[in-house]
Image (cartoon, rainbow, N blue to C red):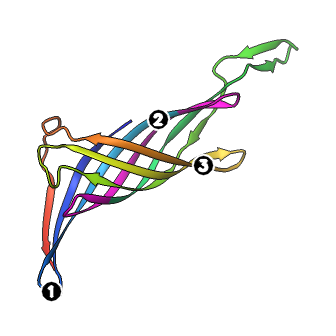
Amino acid sequence: MGADYLVITKNIDKERKNGSHKLITKNRYLTSNIGLYYHKGYNANIFLQVGYLLERTNAKGWQRSFEPQIGISRTFIDAPVYKVTDAGQVKKIRAAGDFYLAPAFSFGFGKDFSVKHPNNPLKLFTKVTVFMNYPYNNFIYARGIIEAGAAYKFSNLLSHSVKVKNKKR
């Protein structure tokens, strides 16, 4: 689950050789995401990440995106964990697990329906993400995530000024 905050919009009007125009919009967002996953018998992981989303949309609403992210992750082992004290007593450790640095990057594509129909603030997308934990046994642990989702644009939730650039090429 996440939230995007639009920072910059670039509208590009390219003239083709045949005289027609190709309209492209490039948006830049600050993003925040919180997520979790559970591997039965291994661990559960909750993570919080922030990122910078680079999104390109054509005149028909088709999009592609790239997003580098940085965050923190906390794992919880899915089994009882015990520790032997210096006195030789065995004690159960509650909420056993670790904190990790959690960088990631994702590539996505989708369809923004509000481009052709302004009253439809829905966007459908799919993303492929490489999610990492560091240090993981003194190395980097990477795994792939495939995400399919929907986004809804709340028009009056956060009103702010966006830097808009218009270009003709």
Alpha carbon separation for disc pair 3 and 2: 15 Å
Alpha carbon separation for disc pair 2 and 1: 47 Å
Alpha carbon separation for disc pair 1 and 3: 46 Å
Tag nearer the camera, 1 or 3: 1
Find out whether the residues at labels 2 and 1 contact each other: C-beta distance under 8 Å: no
Q: Pointer 3: residues within 10 angstroms few (<14), some, or many (20+)?
A: few
Q: Nearer the viewer, residue 108 or 100?
A: 108
Q: Residue at x 72, y 45 (%)?
A: 137
Asked which secondary structure carries label 1, the reply is loop
Would you say residue 55 is visible in this rendering? Answer: no
Q: Main secondary structure of the magenta part?
A: strand
Disc 3 residue type (three-letter): Arg
Among numbered discs 3 and 2, the one appearing first in the sequence: 2
Which residues make up the magenta segment? Answer: 37-63
Percent position of residue 117, x then y: 13, 50
Note whether 111 is above or below 5 in the view shown.
below
Give the residue number, with chain letter if any, for mark 3: 143
Percent position of residue 52, x then y: 35, 53
36 in the magenta segment:
no
Percent position of residue 111, x then y: 29, 53
Q: Nearer the viewer, residue 51 or 62?
A: 62
Asked which secondary structure carries label 3, the reply is strand
Give the residue number, with chain letter if any, for mark 1: 18
Q: Quadrant of residue 95?
A: top right
Q: Residue at x 14, y 65 (%)?
A: 165
Q: Pointer 1: residues within 10 angstroms few (<14), some, or many (20+)?
A: few
Disc 2 residue type (three-letter): Gly
Give the residue number, with chain letter if any, for mark 2: 35
Q: Residue at x 30, y 59 (%)?
A: 63
